Image: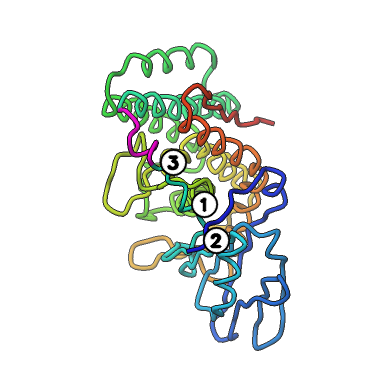
Amino acid sequence: MCIIIMLSLPDFREKQILLVNAEYGSKPALRFQNDNIVFEKEGVVINRASCHKVFAVYVAGEISITSALLRKGHEHGVSLYLAKPNFEVYVSLTAEASGNYLLRQKQYTLPESRELSVARHLIKNKIENQLRLLKSNKKIENLAQEKIKYFALIDNIQDNKSLLGIEGSMSRRFYNAYFKEMGWRRRAPRSKEDVVNFLMDMGYTFLFNLVDGLLLLHGFDTYKGCYHKLFFQRKSLACDLMEPFRCIIDKKILTMYHLKQIDEKDFRIVQGKISLDFQHNAKYAKFFAEVLMNHKEELYTYMQNFYRHIMDEHNSLTVFTLKIK
């Protein structure tokens, strides 16, 4: 297997996410030509992008893909995600530095005390950004006091279960207040019981795959987490490292609502679940892909610093602070 060399930040600055809507009946195809990823319909080239500037390709719908594209994409560190028409990923072909055995040795032998320390840091970072969003919407008065209160609770916990309780309590408080004007009822992952939950699932999926891709390029085993423990077929480390960045998606959804970019007519109910009509997929996928690309440097730096911390605990973990305009 080819080992992918880890990307530097200057290289990653040039990377983008490609979104491909494979419309049924148009004979859509992706192929590789002259260092370009080429998208065709009915044999006609619709668009192309240099493989040197692509981090990931998301395809929604049925499409033909050449073996040359898979081979060259792997060589250039391009991850491919195949998704249902609603952009729910069902298979991924990800680039990774799978030969970084020193990192994985460190990862597998990390003491429980260090795992808990990492988990504390991630949840503190997540809660701080949630508080910043609540403060921006005037849902809380004193950000500093709230931060001190939650950080003290987290510092005093002695096990992962207690940390889960604090995070869950804060998340319920956050969602209830922040999305109140959108008619918020509850967070129901993957059930798609209303539009806001549907959009969260969609946005969080993009975020998850971006974080997972960055961790893989550094050589991590993303099934072995610190906060989220081992569970069959769950990429626990990617779940861990996306926590501080969920606020990006939360903020974007409320912004879309305020700008009237969410049209209830775009959605319909299929077998008791909210579904998005195919022709509107790209509209919402583009919103999330663009906002994540706006934060790609922070995401890269966060994962890189996490890598350095795991290799040597004297390297401090970094903090992601969401900018509130």
Question: Measuring 53% from the left and 24% from the top, which residue is drawn there?
Answer: 315
Residue underneath mark 2 = 79
Mark 2 surroundings within 10 Å by alpha-carbon count, few (fewer than 14), some (14 through 19), many (20 or more): many
Which is closer to the viewer, label 3 or label 1? 3
- Three-letter code for the amino acid on which mark 1 is drawn: Gly
Q: Quadrant of residue 302?
A: top right
- Three-letter code for the amino acid on which mark 3 is drawn: Leu
Q: Position of residue 31 (x, y in %)?
A: 62, 78
Seen in the picture, residue 135 relative to 76 is either above or below; the reply is above
Seen in the picture, residue 194 relative to 10 is either above or below; the reply is below
Q: Position of residue 102 (x, y in %)?
A: 44, 41
The magenta-colored residue range is: 105-111
**Which one is earlier in the sequence, the residue at label 3 or at label 1?**
3
Question: Measuring 62% from the left and 37% from the top, which residue is drawn there?
Answer: 298
- Three-letter code for the amino acid on which mark 2 is drawn: Ser
**Which one is earlier in the sequence, the residue at label 2 or at label 1?**
2
Q: Quadrant of residue 47?
A: bottom right
Q: Position of residue 209 (x, y in %)?
A: 49, 53
The circle drawn on residue 102 is 3
What colour scheme was applied to this rendering of the protein?
rainbow
Quadrant holding the C terminus: top right
